[in-house]
């Protein structure tokens, strides 16, 4: 993730308020903030999924390209109660921003954790997925 991308995401995250409503999906804005933070925890290996290798990669990619919902690894679903529990919106939003900044500064040779569905991924794949994921959820709340 480039510094420019990180700065743009930080700007958009700052636009979020607790009153934002989703244009699609079931998460509220606070759940989405925690869900996105959990993504960065997953990448670093500090939060682990409850399943690995269950969903076909081509299926996920096809759904994403078609603009359809993709499955969430077990252990990360906010609506299901598996993700990090929202506490204080401003605090959780700050944690997301810190996590995004930390992720954006990881070295190219960082030893990422395996993705629950995609397995071992290199720096470029993780950063592309992070940018896609952040953009998807910020668009969900029209920021």
Image (cartoon, rainbow, N blue to C red):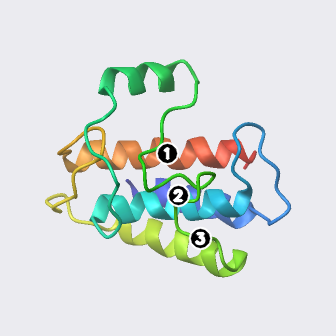
User: 81 or 102: nearer the eye?
Assistant: 81
In the picture of the structure, the residue carrying the numbered disc 2 is 36
**10 Å crowding of disc 1: few (<14), some (14-19), many (20+):** some
Helix, strand, or loop for circle 2? helix
Side (left or right) of 111 relative to 41: left
The percent coordinates of residue 47 (x first, y second) are 35, 66
Helix, strand, or loop for circle 3? loop
Relative to residue 119, is residue 82 depicted above or below?
below
> Which sits earlier in the primary sequence, circle 1 or circle 3?
3
Residue at position x 13%, y 59% from top? Answer: 109
The percent coordinates of residue 53 (x first, y second) are 25, 38
- Tell which tag, 3 or 2, sits nearer the viewer: 3
**10 Å crowding of disc 3: few (<14), some (14-19), many (20+):** few
> Which sits earlier in the primary sequence, circle 3 or circle 2?
2
Q: Which numbered circle lies on residue 85?
A: 3
Side (left or right) of 109 relative to 102: left
> Which sits earlier in the primary sequence, circle 1 or circle 2?
2
Relative to residue 98, is residue 125 depicted above or below?
above
- Tell which tag, 1 or 3, sits nearer the viewer: 3
Side (left or right) of 91 relative to 71: right
In the picture of the structure, the residue carrying the numbered disc 1 is 133
Residue at position x 34%, y 54% from top? Answer: 50
Do labels 3 and 2 touch, CB within 8 Å? no
Q: State which quadrant residue 97 falls in.
A: bottom right
Do labels 1 and 2 touch, CB within 8 Å? yes
Measure the C-alpha gap from mark 1 to mark 3: 19 Å
Specify whether residue 104 is in view: no
**10 Å crowding of disc 2: few (<14), some (14-19), many (20+):** many
Measure the C-alpha gap from mark 3 to mark 2: 12 Å
Side (left or right) of 130 relative to 11: left
Helix, strand, or loop for circle 1? helix
Specify whether residue 98 is in view: yes
């Amino acid at each position: 993730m480039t510094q420019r991308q990180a700065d743009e995401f930080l700007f958009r995250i700052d636009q979020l308020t607790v009153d934002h409503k989703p244009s699609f999906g079931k998460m509220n804005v606070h759940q989405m903030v925690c869900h996105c933070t959990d993504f960065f925890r997953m990448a670093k290996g500090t939060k682990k999924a409850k399943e690995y290798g269950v969903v076909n990669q081509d299926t996920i990619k096809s759904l994403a390209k078609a603009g359809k919902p993709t499955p969430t690894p077990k252990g990360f679903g906010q609506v299901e109660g598996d993700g990090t529990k929202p506490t204080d919106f401003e605090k959780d939003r700050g944690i997301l921003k810190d996590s995004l900044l930390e992720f954006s500064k990881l070295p190219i040779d960082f030893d990422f954790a395996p993705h629950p569905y995609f397995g071992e991924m290199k720096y470029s794949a993780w950063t592309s997925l992070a940018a896609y994921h952040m953009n998807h959820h910020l668009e969900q709340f029209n920021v």
